[in-house]
Amino acid sequence: MTTLILRTAAVYLMPLLLLFSVFILLRGHYLPGGGFVGGLIASIALVVYGYANGINQIKMFLRFHPGALIPTGVTLSLLSGTLPLFYSRPFMTGLWLEGTYPIIGQVGTALIFDIGVYFVVVGTALTIIFSIAEDNERD
């Protein structure tokens, strides 16, 4: 049973938490944080909204099964690790584009790796939560 207060708060908290998760993701390729912590925050945002409004609302919001994010994230992470091999550098060596970009800063393979980890964490966490919720609905 959820209350009106929780449902209302979840509507306002979800976009704020998702924005904060992207901030942590973008901050992480320079400082502590990054894909794992940002992915956990995004998952928490979606789980709180789903708990308050029903898991079907999150499924409608996402429009795809979150498990699809897992292979996408693994592919991005592997790509960021193997890209330096084409430049005769060791595996997982950081490569950076010239210049800086507003809000993001420097763009390089570390950011691509963090985005991949972000997708894997969100996909894994939401897949687990969806599986548990579906089992509870059947009972």
Image (cartoon, rainbow, N blue to C red):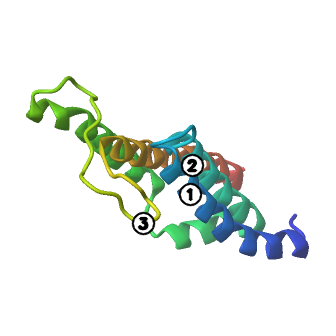
Q: Which mark is residue 102?
A: 3
Give the mark, 3 or 1, whose residue is nearer the N terminus: 1
Picture coordinates of residue 56 (x, y %)? 61, 68
Which numbered marker is on residue 38? 2
Q: How far from the left and from the top, in percent, is residue 8?
A: 81, 76
- Residue type marked 1: Phe
- Which residue is labeled 1 in the image? 23
Q: Is residue 125 toward the left or the right of residue 30 in the image?
A: right
Q: Report how far apart the C-alphas of labels 2 and 3 lie in the structure.
A: 20 Å
SS at badge 3:
loop
**In the depicted view, which residue is nearer to us: 74 or 4?**
74
What kind of element bears circle 2? Answer: helix
Marks 2,3: beta carbons within 8 A: no
**Which numbered circle lies on residue 50?**
none
Residue at the image point whose x is 47% and y is 55% from the top: 66
Q: CA distance from mark 3 to mark 1?
A: 13 Å
The amino acid type of the residue labelled 3 equals Pro
The N terminus, quarter of image: bottom right
User: Residues at badges 2 and 1 in contact (C-beta under 8 Å)?
Assistant: yes
Task: Residue at 64% x, 70% y: name it.
Answer: 15
State which mark lies toward you, 2 or 3.
3
Comparing 111 with 118, the one in front is 111
Task: Check disc 1: other Cα within 10 Å, few if <14, some if 14-19, many if 20+.
Answer: some
Please, what is the three-letter code of the amino acid marked with disc 2? Answer: Gly
Pointer 2: residues within 10 angstroms few (<14), some, or many (20+)? Answer: many
For discs 2 and 1, the disc positioned in front in the rendered view: 1
